[in-house]
Image (cartoon, rainbow, N blue to C red):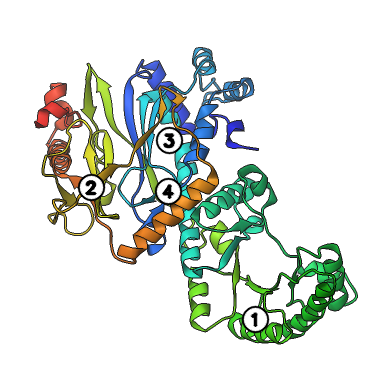
């Protein structure tokens, strides 16, 4: 099971009805530019960890409507019981293949609110149909990778194992969570299918049911050690935790006689700080100094930090529900906005207005430039690739005071983050292994924390793009506030205020 088996029906119905409308009006082949971004950093933090691009590549590489997809669409009807889509449109979909350009920030890169992580450019119809699946993939995996990064940051050098399969949002949610959690820094997963599909190390212990299936806890532990002498981690809290630790120690000594070791014990309830400290004392006194103590039970970054502050003797963490479901923030507010359409051999700017400033979209075709001082990155700037950047660029902050300027004169290097991934539907970027992506993610997080920790990171609009946005916004406001505006005929390129071109602002 991989995303390549998913069809273009993995989209919302209104994407298909809009696509049908574009096709009926002969607008479907117009070239358009859309951007995918999120408006707020998750978990009240100051960053996110970009994740999901490899899944997007798999999805787009085999994106086409199959016969049974089209047969299903043919059964859909409107309120008059007429076919929702014409046969000619379904024939058009049958031959449709992904032919767009895709630019993306690489997986494992630290990213921030407002800055696009994807730019897709191609036929309006295709770009529209891809809105929902791209958001689905990037939103969830970025959310879980960020959560995992935070959990692993709290755990320090301790091992973190993702245990979320049984509480995850369905089979695919579990698989995506396991993949993203590994990229975010987890060392392994309990999900064996994720291990197979994504080459993630798998780990596990046993359940309470193993213990209760035997006449006594000691017999259960002995039996498990006989079956798994070189993979033995015992869950010790089925009846009485400290007594369970003592029984595990007896089994550990028996394993030593067989030239094996008790790898660990697992605590899954009670006062984890006090119990782990006592368990460590008992294990060490018995000579089992290398036996690890694994803790589970509603673990997250806050619990880990608190237990460490209490001096807990825990060396490995099983993190399940709170990680795989992003329990404290179950969704990333990612959006996908049309920002330009190619018309009459020129790009026309598009902008969505809103009473909420954060929901006003940015016009144009964007690139994200990251500025550095030495090895540390200090600011991201969103600029329009048609307008370009001044020789001495100055950004306007998106967050906080809208009039506050953020100069980048003191920076000594920069990199443009959106890289070409697909060109006219052909993938031109070599797929990276999940281990390479994970290494990048962990290195990026370490680098970011050295400078920024919990401080806000500036993301700005380049000055010319900012001025363009303000001008378009003000003109749209003037237009919609005009009395009897609907009765007035406008010359499209001058008075239809959602159409602007780069040369209008030179």
Q: Is residue 6 above or below residue 258?
A: above
Q: CA distance from mark 1 to mark 2?
A: 52 Å
Q: Earlier in the sequence, mark 4 or mark 1?
A: 4
Towards the viewer: 491 or 388: 388
Q: Which residue is mark 2?
A: 413
Question: Looking at the image, which residue is at 68% across and 47% down?
Answer: 193
- Residue 169 in percent (x, y) is at 59, 52
Element under disc 4? loop
Answer above or below: position of 169 versus 33.
below
Residue 131 tag number: 3
Asked if residue 289 lies left or right of residue 35, the reply is: right
Q: Is residue 356 something one can see in this rendering? A: no
Residue 463 at x, y = what percent?
14, 44
Q: Residues within 10 Å of mark 3 (few under 14, many from 20)?
A: many
- Which tag is nearer the camera, tag 1 or tag 3? 1
Which residue has dot 4 on it?
50
The CA distance from mark 4 to mark 3 is 17 Å
Of mark 1 and mark 3, the one earlier in the sequence is 3
Q: Quadrant of the N terminus?
A: top right
Which residue is labeled 1 in the image?
270
Q: Are marks 4 and 2 in contact (CB under 8 Å)?
A: no
Check the image and name the residue furthest to the left: 506
Q: Earlier in the sequence, mark 4 or mark 3?
A: 4
The numbered dot on residue 251 is none
């Amino acid at each position: 099971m991989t995303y390549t088996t998913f069809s273009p029906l993995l989209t919302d119905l209104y994407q298909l009805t809009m696509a049908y409308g574009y096709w009926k009006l002969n607008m479907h082949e117009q070239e358009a530019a859309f951007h995918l971004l999120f408006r707020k950093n998750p978990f009240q933090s100051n960053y996110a960890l970009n994740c999901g691009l490899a899944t997007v590549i798999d999805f787009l590489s085999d994106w086409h409507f199959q016969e049974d997809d089209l047969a299903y669409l043919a059964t859909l009807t409107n309120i008059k019981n007429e076919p929702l889509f014409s046969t000619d449109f379904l024939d058009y979909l049958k031959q449709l293949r992904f032919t767009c350009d895709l630019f993306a920030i690489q997986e494992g890169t630290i990213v921030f609110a407002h800055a696009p992580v994807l730019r897709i450019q191609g036929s309006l119809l295709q770009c529209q149909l891809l809105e929902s699946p791209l958001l689905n993939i990037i939103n969830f995996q970025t959310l879980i990778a960020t959560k995992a990064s935070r959990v692993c940051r709290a755990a320090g050098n301790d091992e973190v194992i993702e245990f979320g399969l049984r509480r995850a949002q369905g089979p695919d949610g579990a698989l995506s969570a396991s993949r993203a959690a590994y990229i975010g820094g987890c060392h392994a997963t309990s999900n064996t299918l994720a291990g197979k599909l994504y080459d993630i190390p798998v780990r596990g212990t046993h359940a309470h049911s193993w213990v209760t299936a035997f006449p006594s806890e000691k017999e259960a532990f002995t039996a498990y050690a006989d079956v798994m002498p070189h993979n033995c981690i015992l869950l010790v809290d089925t009846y009485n935790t400290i007594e369970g630790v003592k029984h595990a120690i007896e089994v550990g000594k028996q394993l030593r006689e067989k030239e094996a070791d008790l790898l660990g014990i697992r605590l899954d309830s009670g006062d984890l700080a006090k119990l782990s400290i006592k368990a460590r004392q008992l294990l060490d006194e018995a000579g089992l100094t290398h036996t690890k103590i694994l803790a589970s039970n509603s673990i997250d970054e806050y619990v880990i930090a608190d237990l460490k502050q209490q001096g807990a003797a825990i060396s490995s963490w099983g993190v399940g529900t709170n990680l795989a479901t992003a329990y404290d923030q179950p969704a990333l507010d990612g959006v996908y906005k049309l920002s330009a359409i190619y018309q009459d051999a020129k790009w026309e700017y598009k902008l969505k207005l809103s009473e909420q400033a954060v929901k006003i979209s940015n016009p144009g075709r964007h690139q994200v430039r990251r500025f550095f001082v030495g090895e540390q990155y200090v600011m991201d700037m969103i600029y329009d690739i048609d307008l370009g950047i001044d020789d001495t660029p100055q950004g306007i902050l998106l967050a906080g005071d809208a009039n506050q300027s953020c100069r980048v004169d003191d920076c000594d290097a920069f990199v443009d983050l959106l890289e070409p991934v697909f060109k006219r539907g052909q993938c031109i970027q070599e797929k990276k292994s999940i281990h390479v992506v994970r290494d990048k993610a962990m290195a990026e997080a370490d680098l970011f924390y050295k400078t920024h920790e919990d401080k806000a990171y500036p993301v700005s609009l380049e000055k010319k793009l900012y001025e363009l946005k303000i001008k378009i916004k003000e003109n749209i406001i003037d237009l919609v506030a005009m009395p009897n505006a609907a009765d007035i005929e406008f010359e499209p390129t001058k008075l239809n205020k959602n159409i602007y071109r780069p040369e209008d602002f030179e």
